[in-house]
Image: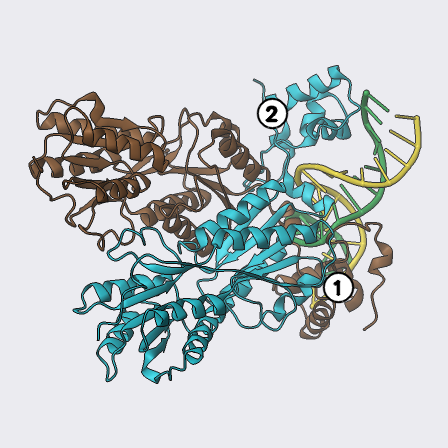
Chain colours: A brown, B cyan, C green, D yellow
Amino acid sequence: MPETTRGAERANGTGRYGNRPTMKDVAARAGVGLKTVSRVVNGEPGVTPDTERRVQEAIDALGFRRNDSARVLRKGRTASIGLVLEDLADPFYGPLSRAVEEVARAHGALLINGSSAEDPDRERELALALCARRVDGLVVIPAGDDHRYLEPEMRAGVATVFVDRPAARIDADVVLSDNFGGARDGVAHLIAHGHRRIGFIGDMPNIHTAAERLRGYRAAMEDAGIPVEDDWMSLGATDPERVRRAAEEMLTGPSPVTAIFTGNNRVTVTVIRVLAAHARPVALVGFDDFELADLLQPGVTVVAQDSAALGRTAAERLFRRLDGALVAPERIELPTRLIERGSGELPPAD
Amino acid sequence: MPETTRGAERANGTGRYGNRPTMKDVAARAGVGLKTVSRVVNGEPGVTPDTERRVQEAIDALGFRRNDSARVLRKGRTASIGLVLEDLADPFYGPLSRAVEEVARAHGALLINGSSAEDPDRERELALALCARRVDGLVVIPAGDDHRYLEPEMRAGVATVFVDRPAARIDADVVLSDNFGGARDGVAHLIAHGHRRIGFIGDMPNIHTAAERLRGYRAAMEDAGIPVEDDWMSLGATDPERVRRAAEEMLTGPSPVTAIFTGNNRVTVTVIRVLAAHARPVALVGFDDFELADLLQPGVTVVAQDSAALGRTAAERLFRRLDGALVAPERIELPTRLIERGSGELPPAD
DNA sequence: CTGAAAGCGCTTACAG
DNA sequence: CTGAAAGCGCTTACAG
């Protein structure tokens, strides 16, 4: 197995891929022109079976694999899209990522992704790094509240769709759940079961979904003519310590709540823990469904959103744009679904 | 805001990025050479403050962003690594992905990923597509049982680390949990609590982790001198229907089991549902921890593996190789941890 | 301090 | 059917 002379021809001694064969190497070994190798590699017509065989043998012998980075540079499109998530490890985003990936795959594109960790600077850094890699499009779960930094990119042709939360200060497609309506329905459900003192524990108020869900809570209370007391509402970080404290204060305050509406799955899980240790039963409806919610006692009534549908809808919209659709940016809202399992149907324990 | 003449100079009418400004455009506008623009963009020294300002103005006016694809082509390394998962939506892989991402980020690399959906062909296709993109390295959760297709890539310098399951027919780094020991300990725990008729329900036997955990089950039984009956063991797909049937058969068979050891989190969840509907109490220990396991009644005793540590260890190993460490491929095994929560401490209901 | 030339590994447009 | 030349947008190596 004689080595080709490539090694000696190259000046690059340190490069990671310094010793990868190129089309030029294949051409030399097969005794054909560069373009003929390109034809064989890409399955283009117009190559004699005999020539093709010789080229193929050289490819196999050298272990050649086309460098798509170089290809991309010449072709324009990279056949890759970027996904900027909030947290890869949050179970809510699992089905969403998978849905985006499936759509990308169906369109022959790869997925490059990363998490913002709810940090606007990190979101920006990541999104721009993806643009520098010249992804064809971007699916973004926004962490920040100003996305004007993406304007030049979008003007330059980077198709961009925001999911789960709307983009701020920029005109772009966005795919959301009906956060307001879902929360309103969930709280109305508690009211219908006789509750009047209902608490709301949600994520930080600057997060759009948290604000919308709080708005839904207020709307349901107002519709029922129930005045809301300040200490029934708590918005902030979703770490267990803060949520636990918030729940305990509502349960033991001057006018203790008989029911709690939780603003997302992480809050719900912590509140369940608090309620498990609480003497009298407290009703609970949570935003977001989660695995095993039906197996707890009581089962947890939730306002479920379809995170896979969010991802799928966003990705499909993205590729429609990449395929040339010149439609105006749109706001797409997906319905939520109330799932009764027991915790939301408990009567007030007064 | 006068348009530059770029648009007219380009023949490329269809390209997605046909109208993105390049360093050449910036150079022309700033009235400097190409290399000077490159210096400013990359923060290299040796540029007059005045020149730098002129270049920066041109950059801002044009909305220039460096094309990293072109850069990569020249530099060799792409500062990206690939991650081939089994399923993006499986909660077990969430912390693993996040850990890989954090390590990549710390090394200034982007993550390109995708799922094999447990399909060997798809794993191969995805891994090779990532190699064609010239990722610097690859973290792979293997789905197939022959990874020789990666040999040429690894020889060409693609650092590769396998996680969660070993690579087959190829010599490479692999980071695993102690599947055998964990399962053996879990089953021994049930035996210590008086059980002798213990069932095992696991994933498909061709999956390494499933086979190892079954081996651990057998070892624990043998250590205790308990003969295992064939219908106490069921390996196969982890869809709820099959698992449910397997569990019900063990519970109602000729010598019904008093305890079940489940081979992974998906199996565990289904078995919990079956046991919830079952008349007499059955002990349960599951491989893999999961959220809310402590809130079920009884709490679910598990053999927990540290999926974040798996990802972190694999990624760190990868970057050590990329940084030039020329160590022999190694098999790293991470310990598991038995967490008692109640279900595994139930006595036999004979 | 600054820049012209060559080259990374491909594809495009064109000519034989 | 086949291939030499030019170019994608950068960086490298070098010269002024």
x, y percent for residue A289: 27, 47
What secondary structure is marked by label 1?
helix
x and y percent of residue A236 in the render?
34, 28
- Classed neighbour count for the residue bearing mark 2: other residues with Cα under 10 Å, few (<14), some (14–19), many (≥20): some
Q: Give the crowd class for mark 1: few <14, some 14-19, many >=20 residues within 10 Å.
A: many
Q: Which sits in the foreground, A267 or A134?
A: A267
Query: In the image, what residue occupies the spot 22% across and 54% down?
Result: A294
> Would you say B139 lies left or right of B181 here?
right
At label 2, the amino acid type is Leu
Q: Residue at x 29, y 62 (%)?
A: B343
Residue A79 is at least partly visible in this image: no
- Residue identifier under label 1: A26
Quarter occupied by the C terminus of chain A: top left
Judging by the rendered image, the residue that carries numbered circle 2 is: B62
Q: Chain of mark 1?
A: A
Q: Quick check: B3 left or right of A182? A: right
The x, y position of residue B326, in whole percent, is: 74, 57
The part of the image, by quadrant, that contains residue B234 is bottom left
- Residue at 59%, 52% (x, y): give it: B315
Q: At which x and y percent is residue B134? A: 65, 53
